[in-house]
Image (cartoon, rainbow, N blue to C red):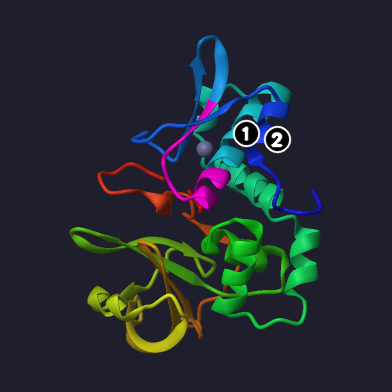
């Protein structure tokens, strides 16, 4: 896969799997038997998120088909979930392509947004892939606005378990579609600290790229709850996306 802008639906269909959007699905995606045919269902979401969910479900299917891993057993395994996320990430953001395009550019939000638009992937998916194989070591925090207010959705990069919390989520209202740096108070296990953070608004989401680490943490794992983070209101989960 040299160019990431292929049609995921066609890739899935090459394996005999139709892809259907099903609004209100309890998760971002699932595999179901419909009229005797295994079908990938994806929840209503942005196209980038639906692409990621479909690629993730395709990985589950291939594990069942090629590795004889029953789907019910796959569902219980966090390792498998993480594998399927990585499969989707490599399929949608081919690392060779990523390396060529990340070379010599700043590790900031404008770069992540440009690559996200280009590859038709979400900003968290792009930052995760750049941390993996683009020479980045950045943490990206995603929030989503619901009627009840802002909710932390996902954290990419950084040390697991050290998720920083914004002291006052109302501050996210300042974010616009043009990335800008704000000084934001974050609360972590080490107390409160002001951290210069790039913020950008994309639809119901705000993405924050802090310019410094939160404490003496080491950033060694790449994806923390990226898919989990896509939950839509009401508990339904929606993708990395
Ligand atoms: Zn899964």
User: Is residue 145 shown left or right of residue 124?
Assistant: left
Q: Do the residues labelled 2 and 1 touch (CB within 8 Å)?
A: yes
Residue 194 at what x, y percent from top left? 36, 89
Instruction: Please tell me whether residue 146 is drawn above or below residue 54 in the rendered image.
Output: below
Residue 109 at what x, y percent from top left? 55, 77
Task: Please rate how many residues cluster around mark 1, counting C-alpha atoms within 10 Å: few if below 14, some from 14 to 19, many from 20.
Answer: many
Q: Name the residue under label 1.
A: 58
Residue 83 at what x, y percent from top left? 62, 44
User: What's the residue at 49%, 55% (across, down)?
Assistant: 226
Distance between the alpha carbons at the discs numbered 2 and 1: 9 Å
- Circle nearer the viewer, 2 or 1: 2
Does residue 196 appear in the picture of this structure?
no
Instruction: Please tell me whether residue 66 is drawn above or below residue 127 in the rendered image.
Output: above
Say which of 211 and 122 sits in front: 122
User: What's the residue at 51%, 54% (across, down)?
Assistant: 241
User: Is residue 100 shown left or right of residue 77?
Assistant: right
Q: Name the residue under label 2.
A: 11
Residue 155 at what x, y percent from top left? 46, 64
């Amino acid at each position: 896969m040299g160019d990431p802008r292929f049609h995921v639906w066609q890739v899935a269909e090459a394996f005999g799997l139709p892809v259907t959007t099903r609004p209100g699905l309890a998760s971002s995606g699932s595999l179901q038997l419909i009229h005797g045919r295994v079908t990938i269902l994806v929840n209503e979401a942005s196209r980038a998120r639906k692409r990621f969910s479909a690629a993730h479900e395709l990985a589950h299917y291939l594990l069942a088909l090629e590795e004889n891993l029953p789907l019910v057993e796959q569902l219980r395994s966090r390792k498998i979930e993480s594998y399927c996320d990585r499969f989707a990430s490599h399929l949608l953001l081919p690392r060779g392509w990523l390396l060529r395009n990340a070379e010599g550019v700043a590790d900031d939000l404008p770069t992540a947004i440009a690559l996200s638009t280009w590859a038709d992937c979400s900003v968290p998916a792009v930052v995760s892939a750049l941390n993996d194989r683009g020479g980045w070591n950045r943490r990206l925090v995603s929030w989503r606005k619901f009627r009840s207010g802002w909710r932390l959705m996902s954290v990419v990069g950084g040390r697991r378990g050290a998720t920083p919390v914004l002291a006052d989520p109302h501050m996210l209202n300042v974010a616009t579609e043009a990335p800008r740096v704000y000084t934001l108070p974050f609360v972590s296990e080490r107390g409160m600290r002001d951290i210069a953070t790039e913020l950008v608004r994309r639809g119901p989401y705000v993405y924050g790229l802090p310019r410094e680490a939160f404490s003496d943490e080491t950033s060694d794992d790449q994806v923390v709850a990226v898919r989990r983070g896509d939950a839509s209101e009401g508990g339904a989960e929606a993708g990395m996306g």
